[in-house]
Image (cartoon, grey):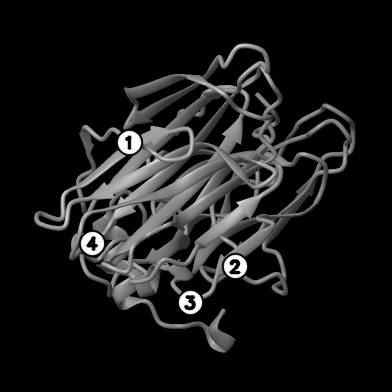
């Protein structure tokens, strides 16, 4: 496993963040803040943190995706992708539709895909995999709850059409496709592709995306121990961080800053700052615990392969969807919306 992952995105920058490219010709995507989401149908909250990636049912055939070029898999090599998926309770279509929500690409050619199928007559949503799109669906995806989606991809070695894709839903293997003729993977794409105009109601949410060379089990949603490899909110509202360890990626240059906020900004004064100074030597913070009033944003302003682990002591908007919703309802914007 990389330190901590080859690529990861919690979407907590509230914008494109570490992703390379956004394609959205009809304005169907957004980086939804928790205070906005709790007013949507079903009153969802991000799986973790303050933001997640939202794609509205587009009612068109355009592409609404984020692309990342660090999702590379060579011939004959296995890699894992993980993300959290939420299908809104009102997600609906007026006709049957199959569309991709994640693709592994070889210079633009789809070599592995996770697809959703929605049945127009019942609005049943099912998930499946295929080389360019899924053709078999036998696993329903319940609406109004978060699901962990994982993809194991063994890329064709180049001589015998021996590529394999395996799909996991909420920890269980549900589908495998094999004998795939694939090229080496150069990119990953998440969002919606190839929808019909009849898919016109509701939205999808994506959170906690990660890609690595080993399986990426995610810890409990509201676990008090947390590891991050990119900017992320540890919690919203008043709370406390009891322990901090900065993970060095091999260059002795990782800088970590913690901010007292629940809205992403790179211009705030940090509440806490620490760094590594020796290659491959992690740093346990001595000046803890650290108290926060509006929330805790962890940022890495610099460093090679940054990472950190935290012990969360307590937090108001933590422990359940209900706690996050309750705080969002009573929250008052800080001066200058910070």
Disc 3: which residue: 27
Q: What element carries label 2?
A: loop
Q: Is residue 323 above or below residue 338?
A: above
Disc 1: which residue: 135
- The answer to whether the residues at label 1 and label 4 have Cβ atoms under 8 Å apart is no
From the viewer's perspective, is 110 left or right of 28? right
User: Camera-side residue: 68 or 60?
Assistant: 60
Disc 2: which residue: 15
Residue 103 x, y percent position in the rendering: 52, 43
From the viewer's perspective, is 56 left or right of 11? left
Which mark, residue 91? 4
Label 2, label 3: how many angstroms apart (C-alpha)? 14 Å
Residue lying at the far left of the rendered structure:
122
Label 4, label 2: how many angstroms apart (C-alpha)? 24 Å
- The answer to whether the residues at label 1 and label 3 have Cβ atoms under 8 Å apart is no
Q: Is mark 1 on a helix, strand or loop?
A: loop
């Amino acid at each position: 496993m990389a330190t901590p992952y080859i690529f990861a995105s919690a979407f907590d920058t509230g914008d494109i963040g570490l992703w390379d490219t956004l394609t959205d010709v009809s304005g169907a995507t957004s980086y939804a803040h928790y205070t906005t989401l709790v007013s949507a149908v079903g009153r969802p909250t991000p799986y973790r943190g303050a933001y997640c990636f939202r794609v509205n049912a587009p009612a068109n055939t355009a592409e609404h995706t984020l692309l990342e070029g660090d999702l590379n898999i060579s011939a004959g090599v296995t890699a894992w992708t993980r993300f959290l998926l939420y299908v809104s309770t009102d997600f609906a279509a007026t006709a049957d539709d199959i569309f991709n929500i994640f693709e592994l690409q070889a210079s633009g050619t789809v070599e592995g895909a996770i697809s959703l199928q929605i049945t127009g007559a019942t609005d049943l949503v099912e998930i499946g995999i295929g080389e360019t799109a899924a053709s078999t669906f036998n696993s329903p995806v319940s609406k109004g709850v978060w699901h962990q989606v994982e993809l194991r991809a063994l890329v064709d070695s180049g001589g015998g059409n021996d590529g394999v894709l395996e799909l996991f839903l909420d920890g269980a293997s549900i589908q495998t496709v094999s004998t795939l003729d694939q090229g080496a993977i150069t990119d990953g794409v998440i969002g919606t592709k190839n929808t019909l105009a009849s898919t016109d109601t509701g939205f999808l949410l994506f959170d906690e995306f990660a890609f690595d060379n080993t399986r990426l089990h995610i810890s409990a949603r509201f676990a008090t121990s947390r590891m991050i490899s990119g900017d992320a909110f540890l919690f919203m509202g008043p709370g406390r961080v009891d322990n901090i360890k900065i993970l060095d990626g091999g260059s002795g240059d990782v800088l970590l800053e913690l901010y007292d906020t629940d809205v992403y900004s790179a211009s705030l004064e940090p509440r806490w700052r620490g760094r590594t100074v020796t290659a491959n030597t992690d740093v346990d913070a001595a000046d803890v615990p650290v108290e926060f009033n509006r929330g805790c944003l962890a940022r890495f302003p610099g460093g090679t392969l940054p990472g950190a682990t935290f012990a969360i002591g307590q937090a108001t908007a933590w422990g359940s969807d209900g706690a996050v919703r309750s705080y969002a309802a009573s929250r008052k914007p800080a001066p200058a919306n910070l």
